Amino acid sequence: EAGVAQSPRYKIIEKRQSVAFWCNPISGHATLYWYQQILGQGPKLLIQFQNNGVVDDSQLPKDRFSAERLKGVDSTLKIQPAKLEDSAVYLCASSPGTSGHTDTQYFGPGTRLTVL
Amino acid sequence: AQSVTQLDSQVPVFEEAPVELRCNYSSSVSVYLFWYVQYPNQGLQLLLKYLSGSTLVESINGFEAEFNKSQTSFHLRKPSVHISDTAEYFCAVISTGYSTLTFGKGTMLLVSP
């Protein structure tokens, strides 16, 4: 079974530029998560999708971050414009069911973003 | 509010020695608890979880964790570690009524020969 795929693996941009990350979850997984992991901290949930609907985006900085999951499969996370403090690893995860965070989450390798 | 504290940022240990990685949580309601592991250059993967039932849960590679409600802890233990256990370990909690999994800051386990 293929795992969660993310691209790119690394990205370096200047502040105020835009950037987009892509995630392909495990086939058939209903729930998709985007996390932000700043160096030295644990992952922090940004947004959770169930199929193509948003379940939780309470910690997403909506003035600059946006995410979509078209057709309930792939997802993209965008930052526009980026700030220095957005430097982090962005993790995508998926889980098979819809019962929330008690489901096992399967994580991708992450995208490391550096904002200069 | 819910929170997780992993007091040790790094735990160095020799191969075949026992290890305990500490995790304490804060919540006023029932909780579900998880340990995730991140091996070098890999994504996080679930090691074990406590949802209900027996307070002692085990993983397939010899780790175990015990849910202690009175001490609000979920410490991870292994009686004899291998070099291949070198990784970062994250404790996570979700409380009933919450929709967000909260992770600790992680503990880097460094196993040397």
Image: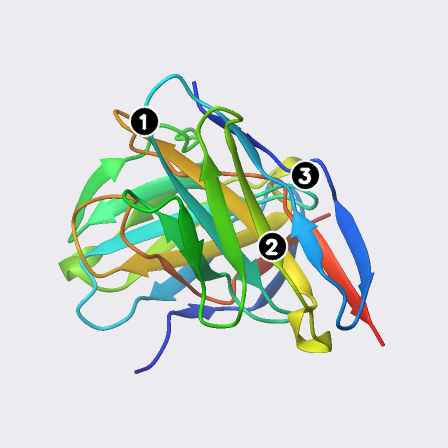
The answer to whether the residues at label 1 and label 3 have Cβ atoms under 8 Å apart is no
Name which residue lies at 29% across and 32% down: B99
Asked if labels 2 and 3 share a chain, the reply is no
Camera-side residue: A11 or A30?
A: A30
Camera-side residue: A9 or B42?
A: B42
The residues tagged by marks 2 and 3 sit, at their Cα atoms, a distance apart of 38 Å
Q: Is residue B105 left or right of residue B35?
A: right
The dot on residue B77 is: 2
The residue wearing badge 1 is B30
Residue A112, x across and y down, in percent: 61, 59
Residue A107, x across and y down, in percent: 42, 62
Residue under mark 1: which chain is it in? Answer: B
The quarter of the picture where residue A106 lies is bottom left
Residue under mark 3: which chain is it in? Answer: A
**Vertical side of B71 occupied by A87: above or below:** below
Can residue A62 be seen at all in this image of the molecule? Answer: yes
Q: Secondary structure at mark 1?
A: loop
The amino acid type, in three-letter code, at marker 3 is: Leu
Camera-side mark, 2 or 1: 2
